[in-house]
Image (tube, grey):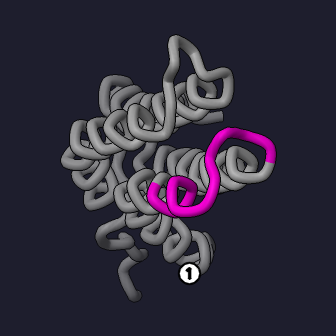
Amino acid sequence: MEDTLTQGAIRNLVAALILGGHLSIFICALLLGLVGPLKGTDLVQVVLIGSPILCVTAGAALRFVLEGHSDVWKGSSVTATFASVVILIPSALIASVLVMFYAIFKQINGFGPNELKVGLGAIETFFGIFIGMISDKLFGTTPRRPML
C-alpha cells in the first residue's frame, strides 16, 4: 500500500466533496423556500447569489467525473499541505454557506433575507479566487497517460 498522496487521489476526493457540497447547498436552499423563511424572489436571488463559484467548480468536477477515471493517471505526488489546502478551502466555502442557511432558518438575531444575500455575496467574493485556482489546478486540464 502506498503512503504517498497523489494529485489524482486528491482530485477524486475534491470532486466528490464539491459535487456533494453543491448538491447539498442546492437542496438546502430549496428547503428554505419550502419550509423556511425564503419565498419568491428572495429564494431565487439567494440561489443565484450562492451558486456561481461552486457551480463553475462543480461543473469542472462533474466534467472530470464524466470523462471516467480509467484513462486518468495518478499524477505526481503532492505534499500534505497541498492536500490540506485544496480540501479545506472548498469545505470552508460549503460550511460557510450552510451556516448562513442555518442562521436564516433559525432567524438568529433577526437574520433575514437581506442579511443572507449580503453574507452570500461576501462569501462568494472571498472564496472566488481561491476556488478558481483550485479548480484550475485540479480540473483545468486532465492529465492523461502518455500514448505508447
Near-viewer residue (97 or 84): 97
The part of the image, by quadrant, that contains residue 119 is top left
Q: Which residue is mark 1?
A: 67
What amino acid is at disc 1?
Answer: Glu
x and y, in percent, of residue 72 in the image = 50, 70
Near-viewer residue (10 or 120): 120
Magenta extent: 35-45
Spot the residue most to the bottom: 148
Please state, as top left, top right, bottom left or bottom right, where the C terminus lies in the image: bottom left
At a point 55% along the width and 25% down the height, the residue shown is 99
x and y, in percent, of residue 116 in the image = 44, 36
The answer to whether residue 90 is seen in the rendering is no
At a point 27% along the width and 37% down the height, the residue shown is 122
At a point 39% along the width and 87% down the height, the residue shown is 147
Label 1 crowd bin: few (<14), some (14–19), many (20+), radius 10 Å: few
Q: Is residue 79 above or below residue 71?
A: above
Near-viewer residue (97 or 117): 117
The part of the image, by quadrant, that contains residue 53 is bottom left
